[in-house]
Amino acid sequence: MSYRKRHEPPKTGQQTFLPPAEVEYSNPGAIRTLSTSRLTSGLHYQRPVEQKNVDKLIHHWNSLELYPVIVSFRDGKFNVVDGQNRIAAMRQMAGGGDVIVPCMIYTGMTYEQEAELYAKLDKGKRPLTPRQHTKALIESGSDASVMEIKRLVEDVGFVWALKEPTGEPFEIAPIRALMNAYQLLGGDAFSRMLSLMAGAWQGTPNSLRASMLSGMALFVKTYEAELHDRTFIRRMSAVSPEEIIRLGRIETDVGLRFARIILDKYNGGGAELPYRFKR
């Protein structure tokens, strides 16, 4: 018995079982069968299809557990919100051709609402990485804090790498460290921190590591009222991020150890700013 027959793949073909034109879709969704040739996937808010996940689905395939693909009918297109891996698995079992699949079709949703629904549905599955989850929130526009962080980052001239980082200057890859810095500082001080980092280190990749962001956030929080921006940029531009990173490996508390080194370098060996860290 062939591998394909054992797994009973869906029937192939280009035929599409669409409802009559006068039928209106309703929310929370109407069940219809569609050919995968009519489905659009790979939207920006979705994580990419991974072959290892497709292979796992095929290995454990059970047609009795084939749940409908979640689809949003928008602008004349059937957009797959949830079910990309299932579609890929069914097409692979059918030799790469299109198949007929059950769909739960929603109508009247915006792109942003699709992204929000995707993020909610995906919580019950393999967890999204922080980057994937944040990207979905950005696309949906549903989280005010995340949207504010992105705006402030871009206002200073940085790029928040919500796709895979490229290592280019002024590209901020860390997710949690950046969000934690925003939560610690608030919008104005967060923007100031980024401006100080840009001025001192010109967006070099090592200056934008998670440890550097954590240390800078604690440093700015502690010395916000006493810190002179021009002095910071002038003095710290003479100190490489690599030196701070090397010295920061000595202690255990990441944020504190980097903040202490930044303070020491800012003071230039003197006592201009007193030691005030409380942890």
Image: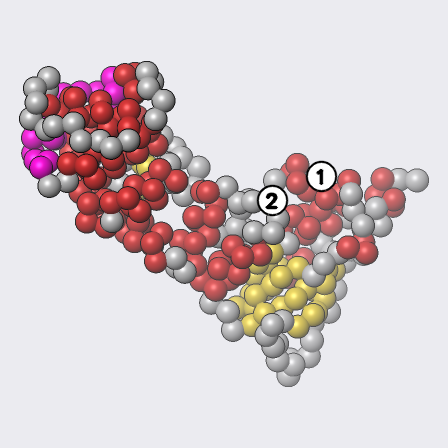
**SS for callout 2:** loop
Residue 115 marker: none
Quarter of the picture holding the C terminus: top left
Left or right: residue 190 compared with residue 99? left
Helix, strand or loop status at disc 1: helix
Where residue 106 appears, as percent x and y from the top left, is 59, 70
Q: Kindly identify the amino acid type of the residue bearing the numbered disc 2.
A: Arg
What is the CA distance from the residue labelled 2 to the residue labelled 1? 15 Å
- The vertical placement of 70 against 171, above or below, is below
Side (left or right) of 127 relative to 174: right
Q: Which residues are magenta?
A: 226-244
Q: Residue furthest front?
A: 278
Name the residue at 62% across, 68% down.
Answer: 105
> Which residue lies under the disc numbered 1?
55
Amino acid type of the residue that numbered disc 1 sits on in the rendered structure: Asp
Relative to 57, residue 197 above or below: above
Looking at the picture, how far across and down is residue 256, in whole percent? Answer: 28, 28
Which class describes the residues within 10 Å of circle 2: few (<14), some (14-19), or many (20+)? few
Q: Verify whether residue 207 appears in magenta.
A: no
| Point 34% across, 58% down: residue | 144
> Residue 126's mark?
2
On screen, residue 106 versus residue 266, left or right, reads: right
The residue sitting at 56% across, 44% down in the picture is: 127
